[in-house]
Amino acid sequence: MNSAAASGGQRWEPTEKGVHLRGRRTRNTRPEVALRRAVHALGLRFRLHLRIVPRCTPDFVLPRWRLAVFVDGCYWHGCPDHSPAEFKGPNADRWRQKIETNRTRDRRNNLLLEEAGWRVIRIWECEIKRDVHLAAEHVAREARGV
Ligand SMILES: [Zn+2]
């Protein structure tokens, strides 16, 4: 991942939460693995971490359906329900900026994938935590275009 751009010259003040809030897109997170398992159980086959367009690697793709799937963490990708509306503390501006950067990159990736003939679905982390089977069915519906 392009962490140089993310931190580009900015210094993050250390805070207690800092380490896990650094916001790098990590692979094989628990919600991601849970969703893959549930999608697999529905009989859909996927490939992991395939780079389809430069600098864009969806969490998994369903090649047969040309569908790219991203699992977006609520906090860093700006989930309307779980990303704080107001940030507090010494890093508040950086957090806001970081989330804006992520959202911009998400939109860019969606466009690049669509231009390459793929469809894109983004599943919120909280959707998976709420009901992984419903989230998997959401992916399946999208895949089959129903
Ligand atoms: Zn959420």
Image: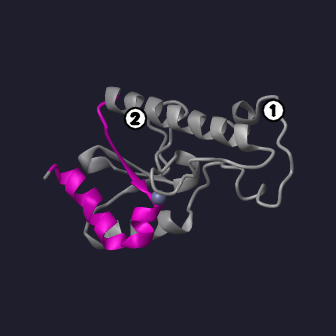
Q: Which image quadrant: the N terminus?
A: top right
Give percent across and percent down for residue 43.
Answer: 25, 68
For residue 57, side relative to residue 23 (left or right): left
Task: State which region is magenta.
Answer: 116-145
Q: Which residue is mark 1?
A: 10
Is residue 119 part of the magenta span, yes or no?
A: yes
User: Mark 1: few, some, or many residues within 10 Å (few <14, many ≥20)?
Assistant: few
The disc, 1 or 2, on the residue closer to the chain's N-terminal end is 1
Image point 52% across, 46% down: which residue?
78
Q: Nearer the viewer, residue 31 or 84?
A: 84
Q: Nearer the viewer, residue 34 or 105?
A: 105
Is residue 49 part of the magenta span, yes or no?
A: no
Q: Nearer the viewer, mark 1 or mark 2?
A: 1
Q: Amino acid at mark 2?
A: Asn
Q: Secondary structure at mark 2?
A: helix
Image point 36% across, 57% down: which residue?
46
Q: Is residue 1 visible?
A: no
Image point 72% across, 59% down: which residue?
20
Compared with residue 145, is residue 102 higher up or lower down, i.e. above or below? above
Q: Nearer the viewer, residue 75 or 52?
A: 75
Give percent across and percent down for residue 25.
Answer: 60, 49
Q: Secondary structure at mark 1?
A: loop
For residue 41, side relative to residue 84 (left or right): left
Q: Which residue is mark 2?
A: 110
Compared with residue 7, is residue 68 higher up or lower down, i.e. above or below? below
Give percent across and percent down for residue 62.
Answer: 32, 52
